[in-house]
Each structure stands twice: as C-alpha cells, then as structure tokens.
Image: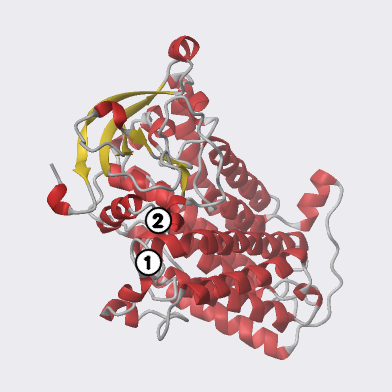
Amino acid sequence: MDWFQADDYELARQVLQRGTAAIYLIAFLSTAAQFPALLGEHGLLPAPSFLKTTYARRQPTLFRSHYSDRLLVLVAAFGAAIAVSLVVGIPQLGPPWVSMVLFLVMWFGYLSIVNIGQTFYGFGWESLLLEAGFTVAFLGSNDVAPPLLVILLIRWLVFRLEFGAGLIKIRGDASWRNLTALYYHHETQPMPNPLSRWAHLAPKWFHRLEVLGSHFAQLIVPFFLFAPQPVTSVAAAVVILTQLWLVLTGNFAWLNVLTIVLAFSAISDSVWRAVFSFSPVGEYDSPPIWFVVVVLAASALILVLSYWPARNLLSKHQLMNASFNRWHLVNAYGAFGSMTKQRYEIVIEGTSAESPDDDQAWLPYEFKGKPGDPRRIPRQFAPYHLRLDWLMWFLALGSRESRWFEVLLVRLLDADAKTLKLLRIDPFDGTPPRWVRARIYLYRFATRAQRRELHVWWMREDVGMLVPPVTRRTQDRP
C-alpha cells in the first residue's frame, strides 16, 4: 500500500499529534479556569440560559440536556487528562484506533464547550483547533506509517489558513495594499506583548518590509506546500518563521503556535535529517484494512466539506473565520481584514465614596493582559487565551455585543469572587465598591524620549465617559 503510506513523515506525525494535544491541554485548562465566571451558572452570559434558545438546541454538545459548572469542569479535566497522555505519547504506542478514539473524544469534548461558549468562544482559533484535532486523529499510531492523505489534508488546512488570511488583507484594507498596515498593527493589536513596542518603534521601511514578507508568506508560499520535496519543506519553514515573528511580537492565543505545529506536515524526515543530522525512524506494519477504510472515509468527508471554504476563498465577499457546519470542520480563516489605526481602551473604575462626584476617590481595576496602567510593561500570555481581555478590546472598537459588559459591572459591584479572579488587581481587596464607572482612553506607545523621561510604556489621553457612575440600584444613577 505504498500509495496510502507517507513513510518519510514520522517527525511530522510526532509533532502534529503531540503539538495539537498540547494546545488542547491549554484550551481545556483555560476553560476550567475561566468558563464558570464567564459563562457558568452565574456567569456574564450564562450557558444554561443560552441552552434554552432554539439555536443552541441545534448545536452538538454534551451539555444539551444539562449544564452545571461541576460538569463543565469535569469535561475540561477529562479532556486535559487525555491531552496529557497524547503529549507524552502513551496512546500512540498502541494500535491505531486508540489514539484515533482519544483525539475524537477530545475533539467532541471541546466542541461541546465551544458550541455553548457564545461570544467568548467566537474566535477563529477555536475552529482551527477543532478542525486540527479531528484531522490529526487519523494519523494513526507508531505501528503504522502516517497516511499520505491525512498529511495532505493538513497541508490543505495550512493553505486555507495562510492564503485566506492573505486574501482577506488584500481585499479588506487599503493599508495592506499600500504597505502601511504595520505602521499601526503592533500598537493597536488586541493584546501587545513585551516586544510589541520595540517592533512598533522600528523605522517605516522596516514595517513596509514586514508587510511585503506577510504577503509573500501568505499569498505565494502556500501553493508550494504541495510541491515536491525539498521545496515543500522550505515553504513550511517560511510559514514557521513568519509565525514565530508573530509569536515574538503579539499575543494571539494559540493561533500562531498551532499554525507552526500544522506546518510540520510539510517537513519530511529526509529533509530534516539533511539539515539537523537526525530524525525519528519508523518501523511500520501493514495498515489494517479497517484503518485504511476509516481514513479514506474521513478524507472523503473533509474533501466534500472543502467545497464551501474553497468557494469562499474565490468570493469577492470572502468571509473571515467562518464555520460552514455545526461541527467546525473545514472552516474559513483570516485576520485583520480591516486595520485599526488608533488604540482605545476601556478603563473600569470603582469608588467607595458616598458621592460619585469625588474624582480623587476613583480607583482602577486592572486586567491581566490588556493595557491599563501606563507604567506596566505588556506581558506574554499566548498561547494561553485571556478571553475577557480580548472582549474588552472588541468592546472598545464599538462591538454591538455588550450584554456581558453590563453584567460585568454588576459583578464588580457585588465583588463576585469568580469574576475578580479574572482580573489582575481588585483595588478594593474583595469588598464591594459603592460605585463603578467606565472611561475611554486613547493609548499610544511612549516614544523612546517619553520612556526615558516619564518611565512609562504608554501615553494616554482621556476621551470621555463610556458608562457614567452606577450603583447597585439603577435609581441611584446620578
């Protein structure tokens, strides 16, 4: 069965299986830590209420008939345990069905969470992780050679991910076409990291080269993922290097790390060995007939579902980060189809003063990742995903989905312990404030001179009030 086997891709399989499982581990741990406060029984957008809607009842999820925070944590813990076993490589030592079943169980467990996660799980990398987990499930175990069809389908996923992102940029914003997009991106991206300011302060010629590099990596290189070796491995290396640059300069949850993992589907053992003088060597048995049949069936399913994202790539009305089925399989991807050129931040403040008119008494709540205190250096959190911080960025852009924010203010007035754990600093040490409010500021990275003089990372100016002071009783609003 030479046509079925990809004997030269053992390294690729090991990276794909263990790397994808590692991202699932992070996703499940993130869910256990954040879901109850965001979407739990008393969350900002309670899942039990959502599950009563007609839309939710059509979604495949383990929680359709019953949701509780305890069950949610149990599902996340079970998924994390499976992920650990796959990272270590224990299931891969058995027959092919063991790792296949465990990946599919892990995939469906996380699908169950995403499908009730509402706006807090409405990110493209959720669908990417689900699609990756489903496809990687059919790579088999150490006893059989990696199936060639699965290797090619993972490259097809990388192609859609990269080429779709490149097309949405060219179609969506003139700044990508005139090479000025990176004049703004490092400063206005959702969650900067410690190197973002350094990248932003680079000269404009460097930013233009960044954009050219992005266009090359996303619009040209993906086609070479299907070329003969060693060209395919070189194309994968370009994808990996550009994704590493994004890891160094931003916090995009697991998007970039997972893309790096998936790009290894194009790196052969022989090319790796020629460069690094070592690679894993597989000794394979003939694949069982049932395994061949299952892989062919799964591949046929993915190919059929590929019609919709392929058509989307060709459409002048291209959708970004869209799923065409309830199972989040074979999706459309993309990012930054429109470039934000100014950074607005919402700062929530509270006071224990009797009257909200005393501006000296207002103290800010600080988030873990999003900018707040101008003196604080942005931190590195990716591949961990701070969901509340990301939604605060979208809210500052004018997101129409703001019901959760209204509930957040109520939870802060109540000093809700689960909600406060999502924050870095509660200025009231767990006691309820009397009033809260939300102000909007315009943030800019400090120049080198401002940094030396003022010892700040950000410069900001007050734009105005988003939410005037509110207390527990709406009739007390001034």
Above or below — where is 412 with respect to 348?
Answer: below
Mark yes or no: residue 149 visible: no
Q: What element carries label 1?
A: loop
Foreground residue among 346 and 209: 346
Q: Where is residue 406 in the image (x, y as percent from the top left)?
A: 26, 54
Q: Vertically, is 149 above or below 233? A: below
Observer-nearest of 108 and 429: 429
The N terminus sits in image quarter: bottom right
Measured as percent of width and height from the top left, residue 103 is found at 63, 74
Residue in the image at 42% along x and 19% along y: 446
At 50% from the left edge and 31% from the top edge, which residue is drawn? 196
Q: Are marks 1 and 2 in contact (CB under 8 Å)?
A: yes
How far is mark 1 from mark 2, CA to CA? 10 Å
Quarter of image, res 29 = bottom right
The residue under label 2 is 416
In the visual, does 325 lie left or right of 131?
A: left
SS class of the residue under badge 2?
loop
Give the residue pinned by disc 1: 42
Is residue 324 rendered to the left or right of residue 238? left
Q: Which amino acid type is marked by label 2?
A: Asp
